[in-house]
Amino acid sequence: MISRNQIKFINSLKQKKFREQHRCFLAEGSKLVKELSEGPFQLRQIFSTSDWVRQQSDWIGSFSVEQVSLSEMERISTLASPSPVLALFEIPDQTITPACWENDLSLVVDDIRDPGNLGTIIRIADWFGIPQVICSPDTVDQYNPKVVQAAMGSHARIALIYQEITELFRDVRKEIPVYGLMLNGKNLYEANLEKHGFILIGNEAHGISEAVSTFVTHKLTIPFYPADRKGHAESLNAAVAAGIVCAEFRIQNARSEKREV
Amino acid sequence: MISRNQIKFINSLKQKKFREQHRCFLAEGSKLVKELSEGPFQLRQIFSTSDWVRQQSDWIGSFSVEQVSLSEMERISTLASPSPVLALFEIPDQTITPACWENDLSLVVDDIRDPGNLGTIIRIADWFGIPQVICSPDTVDQYNPKVVQAAMGSHARIALIYQEITELFRDVRKEIPVYGLMLNGKNLYEANLEKHGFILIGNEAHGISEAVSTFVTHKLTIPFYPADRKGHAESLNAAVAAGIVCAEFRIQNARSEKREV
C-alpha cells in the first residue's frame, strides 16, 4: 500500500526541478534497477509487486521495499506498460575528470534535446569504453526517466557532467584534439583519429553551435553513399552518427594498439 | 475552418487499421511535407495556418489546402508542439524488388517495435543508398506518425515492404549472403563485406528470431572496446547498430570500387 503523498512525490520526480530539489531519480524494470544498484547509485527505495519481491530475494535483502498493487504501479510508472518494479536512486555528485580527455576519449554533446538520443549516446559511450560524457547545460537532463530507460543501465558505468562547453574548451590545453561531427568536414575514414581528445556531437536540428564550433580542431563527416548521389537524407540521427564515429575511433585505436604490440 | 468529422477522420489515422482502411497517412512540418510531396506519394490534402500558406505559395499551387487555426491544429496534430502544417498522403502500393539484393544491399528488420528506431533506420538506408527495407509483419507500421516524423522525409526515396522473412529467405537463391547482426558473430571489421545481399537487424530486446537466424550465412558483431573489458552495455540500440554496420559495408564497398578503377 502506497500513500497519496508517496504517489505525488514519485510523480513529481518526472520533472527536473523536483529531481534536483530531492536529489533523486526514477528507474523502472528489473534488469535496470538491479544494474543501477550495482553502480555508484545509492538505492533509496523500491516499489514493487509482491511476485517480483519473491523472485528477487537473492539481491534485494537489505534494500527498503514497499509492496504495491498493479493498479498502484500504474499510477506511479512513467511507462506505457508498467514493469513490476520502480526504484528511487540518489543523484550522486559528479565531477569532471581531465584525465579522461588527456589519455582517452571524452564525448561532448552540444544541446541534445531528445531523451531517447541522450540515453542511446550514454549506451554507446558504455559500449565503446568512453568513460565520460560532457553535456552543454541545455542538453536534456540525464535523469529524465526516458533518458534513464534508453540508457539501459549504462549510467552505472558512465559519468555525465553538465557544463558550458565553450568554457571547458577555453580551459583545455591547446594540444588536445576536438573532433567535431559536421556536414562539411573531412571524410571520417580518411582522418587520423587519435586515442585521446573530445568527440563533439551537435544538436539534432542545428548541429554544433557557432560559439562551440570555433574550438573544433578536426571537422569530420560521415560520407553518404554513393559519393556522387543526388537526393539523399540531409543527415543522420545524432545518436546514430555518434555511434558510427565512436566505432571508427575505437577500431582505429584497436588497430594501432595491435601494431604497437 | 475544419469540421468535427474531419478532426475525427484525421485522428483516426493515428491508428494503423484506419490508415489501412483509408489508404492514407499523416505527416507534419513544412520540410517533411514538401519532401514527401516530391516523392512517390500523392498528396491528398494540406491543413495549415494562413501564415504558412502565404510563405509556401511557390510550391503548393495545385494542392488542396484547408486553412485551420492554431487551436484546430492542436486538435489534429500528433506532435507535442504542433507545426503550422499537417498533410494527408496516399499510401502507395509497394512491391519487393529482387534486383535490390542481387546487385545491391537490402536491409531486413525482424520485429523492430519502436517507431523512432524504424524511422531512424529508414533515414540510415537513405544516407547509405540502400534502396529497400524489408520488414517482418510484426515490425511497427512504416506509416505510424512517429515513424514518419523520425524518418524525416526518407520515405520519399526508400521502399519499405512488409513480408514474412523466413518465406523471403526460403525463396532467395542460396548464393545471396545474409549478414545477421548478432552478439556471437565475427568481428565486423574482419569480415569480407560484399556489395550485395541482406543486412539483417533484430528486435530491440530479443535480437534476430530463431526461425530467421537459421538463414543467416554471415554472423557479424560490432566489437566493444577495449576487447578485454568486463562490465559494459549488453548491446547497442538497434538503429545505432544498423548505422554502424551500414557505414562499414559502404566504406568497404567504396574502397573496393576505388581499387577497381
Image: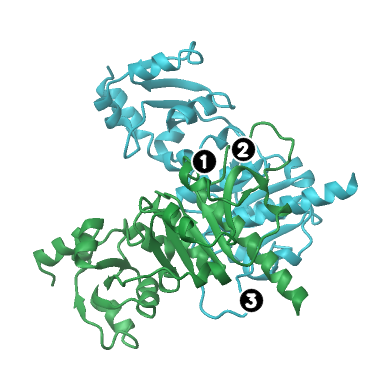
Chain colours: A cyan, B green
Quarter in which the C terminus of chain B is drawn: bottom right
Which residue carries the number 3 mark?
Answer: A227
- The one nearer the camera, B15 or A69, is B15
Q: Position of residue B226 (x, y in %)?
A: 73, 41
Tell me whether the residue at label 1 lies in contact with that at label 2, contact meaning CB atoms closer than 8 angstroms.
yes
* Mark 1: secondary structure: helix
What residue is at 32 percent from the left and 67 percent from the top? B28
**Which mark is first along the chain, 3 or 2?**
2
Which residue carries the number 2 mark?
Answer: A158
The furthest residue to the right: A261
What residue is at 50 percent from the left and 25 percent from the top? A34
What residue is at 90 percent from the left and 44 percent from the top? A261
From the viewer's perspective, is B136 left or right of B20? right
Q: Position of residue A109 (x, y in %)?
A: 59, 53
What residue is at 61 percent from the left and 74 percent from the top? A226
Return the chain for callout 3.
A
Q: Position of residue B133 (x, y in %)?
A: 46, 63
Q: Position of residue B81 (x, y in %)?
A: 32, 59
Which residue carries the number 1 mark?
Answer: A151
* Mark 3: secondary structure: loop
Q: Visible in this render: residue B204?
A: no
Residue type at the position of mark 2: Ile
From the viewer's perspective, is B105 left or right of B49? right
- The one nearer the camera, A19 or B48, is B48
Quarter in which the N terminus of chain B is drawn: bottom left
